[in-house]
Image (spheres, rainbow, N blue to C red):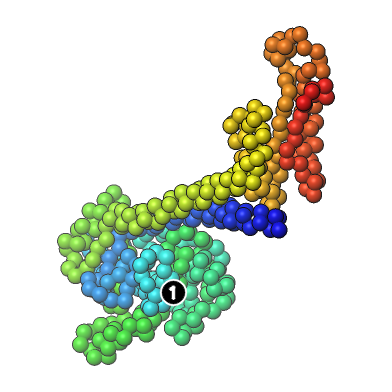
Amino acid sequence: MKSLRILRGYLFTILGITIGVAGLVSLGAMSERIVRFIEGGDRFVLGQISVAGRGMGMGTGFTAGGILPAATIRAIAEVPGVSGVQGQVMLPLDPSTSQFMTLTQELILGVDLSVPSPNRHYPTLPLRSGRFFRENDRRVAVIGASFATSRNLRVGSHVTLDDESFEVIGILERMLTAPDRFVIVPIADARAQWVAKDRLLRTVLASGAIPLTAADLNTGAAVGWQNGEDPDQVALRIRERVPNVNVQLPSELSRLLRSSTAFFSALLAGIGVLAFVIGGLSLANTMAAAVFERIRDFGVKRALGATDLQLGREVLAESLARTLGPNGVHVAYVVIDAVIDVPWTRRAFADRPDDFFIQPSGIADAVHHLVHQERSAWTFELDLRPFGESW
């Protein structure tokens, strides 16, 4: 019964320490991931000017907005300082899911292969395996590393997008930013996906109320700037000269990204503090239990001259041993109740015989034996003193 009572008393402590350690490990991994996520996102958005059609539509990501017609894309290309404009279609893979944190969503990205990528930092996305698109490719996809892992996909596999099958021809390197969850397809396929997903767009196209061609179906565009140009100034020129567009300044997007992740950084810091608090409370609980179980023993030791510091060290060692022992960690409390034989103690006790001192080699032998004990016979408290001492 006593052993069951002790086990019950320390169960919370053991679980608390385990949870605390697991939390700290997870915290470290999440912290590294968020740092790389911010760095990758910064690099991605600072490499291009993102433009979207003004209004509401199914477009998502940095190019969220209404339709960006081909004529508007041509007008953007004529703005001084612009080096290239690539029309894009960016859609949520599942329109029913929340778009609270766009960078972590699974997205369909359609790219216009007739125009080189204007993103200065990612003129091409890094491939882990397979290949990127070729001219006239259809019903093929290049997917992000996280998307591939979550669905156990590899080059040659097929992924279904709105009841249409796409062959996976490439998998991106893990970038720890938005493209990790992308399904990149030729823009013609992305436009077909857009029409299939957006009921309002189907109605507009069927009615013929707005004259639209396939080239007009863009949710946005990635814009590059010429060498020597300030990208923010180029973005401002686009705002001034091209009507009915939403233009994101690269510096504004960078600040937005960092501010949106500030909450999560603070949350992680709070989790770290909480993990330390849980570990501290668990250890305090163990120490309190050890004190209450041995209150009489400590009273006798105090009467015999033990100090609070000595008793505190013993309680701490016992608490650590009870907490860490079940996890295979041997904690021992070594008491050296003697004067160690070193030059300055020889001078201080010059009149004492050799047997009065404890030899450092003897301490080392005892500790060496202690740390190499078989785990079925571990020693907790070890008192070392010369043979001739009267006690």
Tell me the quarter of the image containing the C terminus.
top right
What number of labels is visible? 1
Residue 123: quadrant of the picture:
bottom left
Q: Amino acid at mark 1?
A: Val
Left or right: 134 as drawn, with respect to 209? right
Q: Residue at x 70, y 15 (%)?
A: 345
Q: Secondary structure at mark 1?
A: strand
Q: Position of residue 262 (x, y in %)?
A: 36, 53
Residue 352: quadrant of the picture:
top right
Q: Position of residue 239 (x, y in %)?
A: 19, 62
Residue 319 appears anywhere in the view: no
Compared to residue 216, the image places residue 326 above or below, namely above
Residue 153: quadrant of the picture:
bottom right
Q: Position of residue 57 (x, y in %)?
A: 28, 76
Q: Residue at x 82, y 21 (%)?
A: 388
Nearest to the observer: residue 260 or residue 88:
260
Q: Residue furthest bottom?
A: 207
Tell me the quarter of the image containing the N terminus.
bottom right
Q: Which residue is mark 1?
A: 185
Q: Position of residue 102 (x, y in %)?
A: 37, 66
Q: Residues within 10 Å of mark 1 (few under 14, many from 20)?
A: many
Q: Residue at x 19, y 58 (%)?
A: 237
Q: Residue at x 41, y 73 (%)?
A: 108
Compared to residue 391, the image places residue 322 above or below, namely below
Nearest to the observer: residue 113 or residue 331:
331
Left or right: 77 as drawn, with respect to 35? left
Residue 288 appears anywhere in the view: yes
Left or right: 251 as drawn, with respect to 30? left
